[in-house]
Structure formats: structure tokens, C-alpha cells
Amino acid sequence: MIRPFSTGGFPRQIVLIILLCFCFMQAAHTQTVATGQKEGKYIITILNESKSRISSRAVYITPVDWPYLEHDHGYPVLKDMKQNTVPCQIIHDEDSRRNKSLFFVVDMEKNESRHYTLTWTDKAMVYDQQVRIRLNKRASQASPLVSLTEDIFLPSMLPKLTGYQAYQADGPSFENEKLAFRHYLDGRNSKDVFGKKIKGLMPDSVGVSVKGVPVDNYHIMADWGRDILPVGSSLGLGGLGILHDGKISRLGVTQKDSVHTIKETRFKMENNGPIYGSFSINYDEWKPSQQRHYHVKEEPTIWTGPYAYENTVTFRDLSGDERLLIGLPKLETEKIPVQMKVNNWMVLYTYDKQTYNKEFNLGMAILVPWDLFDGWEKAPEDGAVNSTYLIKLKVNNIYPVTYYAVAGWELSDPAFKTEKGFSAYLRAMTATLDAKLNISIRAAK
């Protein structure tokens, strides 16, 4: 059964690439908020009611939870009981139920209770930037790259037609301090992975030459890391497709195509750190066949802490017989995905030396809601979508689907040097997503 969409916990719940569909909905069921409503200083108490330790759990206190947040009070200042400042931010996304939510991240032991004080200031707090969304584009081959918060991609802009790449790193990059992803906005709409050897954001020079034009300079090892995932004609890690009429169609085209299947693609940056980032991409009139046309919206989100991103997908104009497909690439491995049902999640992962040239161990996973999971299949090697496993999910025009994509590179964390370590991380992540938090807010005396 598809549950209604709502707010809460570890950013919407997890689907490793880790895909999940009712993440936000279920999140509402795993985060209970009781409030008091007076101006001034507030005490926020969080109780982890689960029997598991949670790590990098996203906390959303929404205006639905606490109507006080519906109005502008300035900038939040959150402190723990030792008076240490806890990074937090207000989320801005008018199309999301998370709009105007207070967001922060917690690590807690099982059955632990934490207390925080919340006040407001007229001056923005300065925190270390742990999350960033970036989109740089040139208007013509002779134009310089400029930074954008919104963009429109049209069929006439396919690189096969223009003869050049307009985007730095082929589209928006989205990253936290532990790893980075990029979305190929140039018509392909695949998702790639940058591995990091050190914590922090990627240098601004990644994907741009000294002359200020897009360049592929990220497929060689640098001090910070490199692009680690061969994507090819797969969907990348967590990229989207659809199964209809027994046919597999990708959300977009390949690098060799000169005819697009999407009338208009619209990018909008919603939040850009310091600890939470999100953007939306609307695909208007996607026509995988003459008989089928869809409107699709995806909302990738990333926050400080996890080796993962969250994505929420919404469809319109489905006929009812389709299945959403989520990609788990296999260009450098023949191992079949390992399936783990963990509480409310189905986790599918591969672990192998599956970076470029099979040089390093890399674990990749998708987490999806158990009740939406409808199996998986291997894409044919001679199709427009190939070299990938496809995770199938039930989907309809009413409820969004939320999932998580996860990547663990052995040079990022010693735990990922073994499959056992990667599998343990996935189990811990699902426990974090499933953990029930009881949150109360009261005016300080």
C-alpha cells in the first residue's frame, strides 16, 4: 500500500541509493512533536524511542508541527545543554511540506533524551559549509561560465546538436562533506558519484579549466578525490526510468542522441547549505513512446553526515500499468545485487572493485520502501539503458516516491574496505530512518 506523503525524521526515510518512496510520509509516523507557543526562548526535547543508536538523523520541525514557524522570527540559534552551538537552518521550499521547517541533525544512543535551547537573532549564524549545490553554465561556446539558481534545458540544447558541453561537470553537483554526486542535466539525466579522500567540499576548479570553460579534469586522482563511477549508458546511481508495455525507457536520452524525449527540463535550486541542500527538476511532456507522455518532478536532497542522497519523485499522467525504475549501475561488476529486507525497507546493494578500471572497492545501494518494491531486473546490454540493474517500484499519480542512494568508497572510510563494513553501514542507516523520535517544544521559564 502506498502511504500518504508527510514530514519527519531522517530526511524522509531512506532508500539507499537507498530508495524510498514514502520516506517523508513514514517520517511523520516516526517523529512526534508536541509544542508550547510563547515568544522568546524555547526548550526542544528529543527522545529516541528506538532500541538502536541513530547517526546523522535529520530532524524537521515543520509549521504543521509548530505553527510558530509560519512567521519570520529571524535566524535560529540552537544550543545543547553544554551551550555548544548546534548548526541548524530554516528550509525554504514553497512547493514542499518542509517549507519553513527548522532543520538540524542528531546522533543519539538508544532511549537517549536530549535537550536544546532555541532562540532567534537578526544576524545569520556562520557555520562551516558542509553541503553545497552548484550549477554553472555557459550561454554559448564562447561565453564564460556563470553561476545559476534556475535553468531551462530544451531539446535544441543537446550537446550532439550544439557541438559543445554547456555545463560545468555536465550539470548540477550536490555534495556534503563526505561525498558528492552530479546530475547530467544535458539530456541524459543520469547520476554520477565523486569519491572523497578527505572531508570537505570539492575545489571550485573541479570541472573547469584555467580559462574558465568546462573540462573533464575529475577522472584523475587528486588530493581531494575523483569521479569514481563509470556511468556509460546506465542510469547512474539512482537515475530514473520507467517500465511500460514491456519496454524499458530512460528519463532522457544518451550522449549520442540528437532527438530529445522531453519537451522542457526546468532546474531550480531550493536550499544551498550550510547543512542541508535541495533542488528540483521538472520534466514537462516526457514521451518515452508516442502513446505515453508524463510530467515528472524529482527533488534530490542531501544533508551533512550520510554517504547518501535522498530523492523524491512525483508523476502525473500515468496510465496505471507502469513501474518506476531506479538504476544501480554494473559497468564494472557482474555480481548480482544483494537483497536485505530491514524493517520497512528493501535494500539492494552491490560491493566489488567497481570503480574505473576495477581499481578500488565501492559499495552502492538503493533503499526503497518495502511496500512499493516490485522486484528487480537486469537491463539488456543492447538497449538504450544498459549496464545496470533496475529496481522496480509501484507508482501512481497521487503519492510521491522517496528513495535513497548510497555510495561507500574504500578511500572515504575504512569501514568500506570490506563488504561486511558496507553492509553494516546500510543496516545502521535503515535503523536511523526507522527510529521513532518524540519531540516536544515548550517556552523556557
Image (cartoon, rainbow, N blue to C red):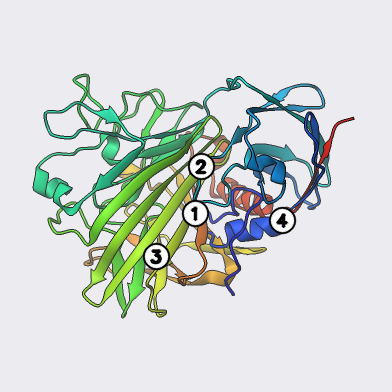
Considering every residue shown, the one lying at the far right of the view is 445
Sooner in the amino-acid sequence: mark 4 or mark 1: 4
Observer-side mark, 4 or 1, equals 4
Q: Quadrant of residue 203?
A: top left
Mark 1–mark 2 Cα distance, whole angstroms, equals 16 Å
Sooner in the amino-acid sequence: mark 4 or mark 2: 4
* Residue with the mark numbered 1: 365
* Residue with the mark numbered 3: 390
Tell me if residue 169 comes above or below residue 66 in the rendering.
above
* Residue with the mark numbered 2: 302
Mark 4–mark 3 Cα distance, whole angstroms, equals 29 Å
Mark 4–mark 2 Cα distance, whole angstroms, equals 20 Å
Residues 383 and 170: in front is 170
Q: Mark 2 Cα within 10 Å, few/some/many (few <14, many 20+)?
A: many
Mark 3: amino acid: Leu
Q: Is residue 122 left or right of residue 329?
A: right
Q: Secondary structure at mark 3?
A: strand
Q: Secondary structure at mark 2?
A: strand
Q: Give the residue at x 66% y 50%.
A: 9
The C terminus - image quarter: top right
The N terminus - image quarter: bottom right
Residue 198 drawn at (x, y percent)? 49, 26
Q: Secondary structure at mark 1?
A: strand
Q: Mark 1 Cα within 10 Å, few/some/many (few <14, many 20+)?
A: many
Mark 1: amino acid: Ala
* Residue with the mark numbered 4: 30
Observer-side mark, 2 or 3, equals 2
